[in-house]
Image (spheres, helix red, strand yellow):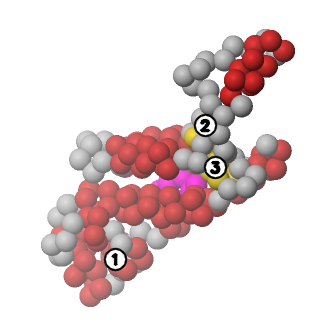
Amino acid sequence: MYDSVERYLPTKLKLVVNRDKSRVCRTAGVDFLGYQFHGYGGQIRVSPKNVLKFKQRAREILNRNRGISMTRRMNELRLYLRGWIDYFVLEQRKSLAITLDKWLRRRVRACYWNNWRLPRTRLKKLKALGVPHEEGYPFAHSGKGPWRLSMTSGVQRAMSNRWLTAQGLFVLADRWSELAPKRRTA
């Protein structure tokens, strides 16, 4: 099969075939330009390798030990997220964007929590965000790390999704919905 394709492309279409990069196979599981094709008809998805690259880059940007302000960090993250979702506009599952959004919100909450180092600062910030003193005290004085505390009820209530968006967090699921017309034309 490959031999006939290799003869046809250079003679009829005048295309050069690179034997190392070319193959004839089923579409299921094939990676191409960061996408992976699945099932009958080749449903287009972001390849798992690129999802891991996305998480690795987001971790670098949201590294809690970087000495930059949260505003600058959020701007850098916004640029990266917008470029990533715009490149992977053909992704057909909104659930991927929703899952990545949840993971990103947790990373950002952990960043803020780490920046509020001292228990008294954490308690003051939680109270300013609407958590009562009695409820915020155990969270502020907890010995657990920022990643663990970022999924607790008090921290999530204080740093709600709306608050994170107001701080400049880019929402992948919203942009995915905005780009829906582009998927119809692909």
Name the residue nearer the viewer: 100 or 30: 30
Crowd around label 2: few <14 · some 14–19 · many ≥20 (10 Å):
few
Name the residue nearer the viewer: 67 or 46: 46
Q: Quadrant of residue 82?
A: top right
Q: Which mark is residue 152?
A: 1
Residue 72 in the magenta stretch? The answer is no
Query: Can you tell which of label 3 and label 2 is closer to the viewer?
Result: 3
112 w.r.t. 74: above or below? below
State yes or no: discs 3 and 2 in contact (Cβ < 8 Å).
no
State yes or no: discs 1 and 2 in contact (Cβ < 8 Å).
no
Residue extending furthest bottom?
Answer: 134
Amino acid type, mark 1: Thr
Q: Which residues are magenta?
A: 165-172
Please tell me which residue is depicted at 75% across the width and 13% down the height of the picture.
10
Q: Label 3 to label 2, Cα distance in Å?
A: 11 Å
Residue 37, how many percent across, how many down? 65, 48
Residue at image mark 3: 28
Please tell me which residue is depicted at 41% across the width and 69% down the height of the picture.
159
